[in-house]
Amino acid sequence: MKILTRLALLLPVAVFAACGTDTYDTGDGALSRMRADFVEARTDAYSNMVSIETDDGARFELEPPVALEWASKPDTVYRALFYYNPNTDAQGATTAEPLAVQQVLVPEIIDAAYVEGGIKTDPVTLETAWESANGKYINLGLQIKTGTTDGKQDPQTIGIVHEGTDTQTDGSKLIRLRLYHDQAGVPEYYSAGTYVSIALSRLSTGLTEGDVVSIEVETYDGTVVKTFEI
């Protein structure tokens, strides 16, 4: 069973040629119309990323399509933070011109009983937590300490653990999740930013209106619990 996600930080941000900024200060450069959205990005049969759908439901074909090392599976949907220019052609069709893209981690949600060796809760910095506009994800913005040993950057491990589900007095469910983080001995020389999206569709217990999802995160300032009513 695939349990947790190993990552080497910094996670790369792929930047495309359209990101030149020579004329940005004049307001008509490549970045003057730039948008940044969390999206579901789809690849085609050739593993090219060809379209995106933002969390508020806007859909764009990518012009041009892009190929990314971490999004190499054909006909697959990936989670990403996408920087782009929206363009409208003479027929009124709107496309997205890719500028840069950052992978967003979407770990499996694993029952606590299946986590071998216990739940690791090495601290992180929790910068932000929010539910996506479409209700599909709970998103975490994290800063994780990292560094190199002998010029080599070892991976750390991130995951989401389901610790239990409680029935509340009104009959709704409280689903208790915890961020799993194994520093794995990586030096804590500097902070690297990453995003984690918790896909609510992956919960083993179905959600109904009024249910609550909590996520517990161990930080350098102590334990933080964020709750979200569905």
Image (cartoon, helix red, strand yellow):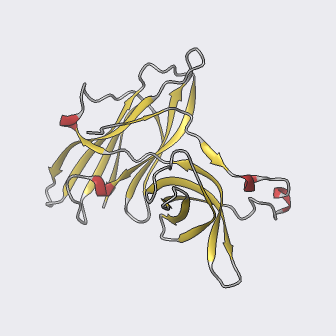
* Residue found farthest to the top: 150
Residue 199 lies, in percent from the top left, at 35, 54
73 or 94: nearer the viewer? 73
Please state the total of marks drawn on the protein image.
0
Residue 96 lies, in percent from the top left, at 63, 67
Q: Can residue 219 be seen in this view?
A: no
Residue 164 lies, in percent from the top left, at 19, 44
Residue 142 lies, in percent from the top left, at 48, 40
216 or 62: nearer the viewer? 62
47 relative to 146, above or below: below
108 relative to 18, above or below: above
76 or 208: nearer the viewer? 76
Which quadrant of the rendered structure holds the C terminus? bottom left
Q: Residue at x 50, y 62 (%)?
A: 44
Which picture quadrant has residue 75?
bottom left
Q: Which residue is drawn at 34% across and 37% down?
A: 4
Judged left or right of residue 164, residue 148 is right
127 or 201: nearer the viewer? 201
Q: Is residue 26 visible?
A: yes
64 relative to 17, above or below: below
172 relative to 61, above or below: above
Q: Residue at x 52, y 71 (%)?
A: 58
* Residue found farthest to the front: 46
Which quadrant of the rendered structure holds the N terminus? top left
